[in-house]
Image (tube, helix red, strand yellow):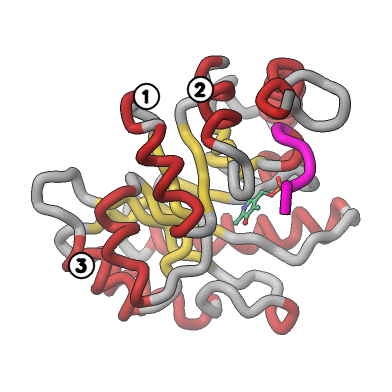
Amino acid sequence: MAIAAGAGSRTLEQCFEAVRARIGAAERAAGRSPGSVRLLAVTKTHSAALVRAAAMLGQRAFGENYLQEALPKLDALAALGLQWHFIGALQANKTRAVAEHFAWVHTVDRDRIARRLSEQRPATQAPLEVCIEVNVSGEASKAGVEPAALDALSDYVAGLPRLKLRGLMTLPEPSTDTALQRAGFRRLADLLARQNARGHTLDTLSMGTTGDLEAAIHEGATIVRVGTALFGPRVR
Ligand SMILES: *Cc1c(COP(=O)(O)O)cnc(C)c1O
């Protein structure tokens, strides 16, 4: 039955145990304290029933990429009090629903989107927690702000009343070369340090997925975003 399935022939519970073990081992290997890395379970293309099964295993934070797909799931699971993170590409005509329904947005990459999210965040809710997405792999990827434009965007976002700027996010080009993986993540960590040296108080590095979470944790990730290792291949 689909809701019992995790990645491969393992049960969902075994998949969560395996990913938590990977995170724990990477924390130890990097000399970081246990529990310093949060697991964001990425559920794009997967059913509300599967999210519910993961919630029963104790997972609270979930990431979704596509608004149309996410809203019915959020609605179906509203009673569970889960924490929803928006991690997909953001278009201006989607910001209102994101501002109303999500606790976090990881993909802020321009002024206009940030301003709309702030204006549209309901006054009855806590400020929206946001990360700025940075393009650390240059030409190869189009998503995210260029590092050279980050100072200006950080200052702008930090000044918006209904957003709380928490940190930086990246999704580098996939690579199996550990040194390359680390170089991209180190770049994001250096950019975070730079923003803090400029007076910001950012505490979040959202980086690392199924294929490269160890490299990300080595370089300081505080949130890893994992889909495939928990839930198997995406279903469409
Ligand atoms: C899909 C996705 C992930 C999860 O990737 P996996 O390789 O399945 O772990 C993480 N971050 C973002 C932004 C994604 O779109």
Whether residue 75 is situated above or below residue 88 in the rendered picture: above
Which of marks 3 and 2 precedes in the sequence? Answer: 2
Task: Name, please, the residue furthest toward the front.
Answer: 1
Label 2, ligand 1: CB separation under 8 Å: no
Label 2 amino acid? Answer: Ala
Q: Whole-percent x and y of residue 99?
A: 28, 57
Graded by Cα atoms within 10 Å as few (under 14), some (14 to 19) or many (20 or more), the crowding at tag 3 reads few
Quarter location, residue 197 = bottom left
Is 25 on the left or on the right of 225, as rendered?
right
Query: Which residue is more in the foreground, 124 or 39?
Result: 124
Whether residue 58 is situated above or below residue 205 in the rendered picture: above
Which of marks 3 and 1 precedes in the sequence? Answer: 1
Query: Which residue is more in the foreground, 65 or 204?
Result: 65
Is 235 on the left or on the right of 59, as rendered?
right
Image point 55% across, 29% down: which residue? 49
Q: Which residue is mark 1?
A: 80
Q: Whole-percent x and y of residue 63?
A: 52, 45
Graded by Cα atoms within 10 Å as few (under 14), some (14 to 19) or many (20 or more), the crowding at tag 2 reads some
Q: Whole-percent x and y of residue 188?
A: 59, 60
The CA distance from mark 1 to mark 3 is 33 Å
Q: Which residue is mark 3?
A: 159
Task: Name, please, the residue furthest toward the left.
Answer: 123
Answer whether residue 25 is visible to the viewer in this image. no
Labels 1 and 2 touching (C-beta < 8 A)? yes
Image point 40% across, 35% down: which residue? 76
Label 1, ligand 1: CB separation under 8 Å: no
The CA distance from mark 2 to mark 3 is 35 Å
Q: Which residue is mark 2?
A: 55
Whether residue 132 is situated above or below residue 83 in the rendered picture: below
Label 3 amino acid? Answer: Gly
Q: Whole-percent x and y of residue 193?
A: 48, 57
Magenta residues, as a range?
230-236
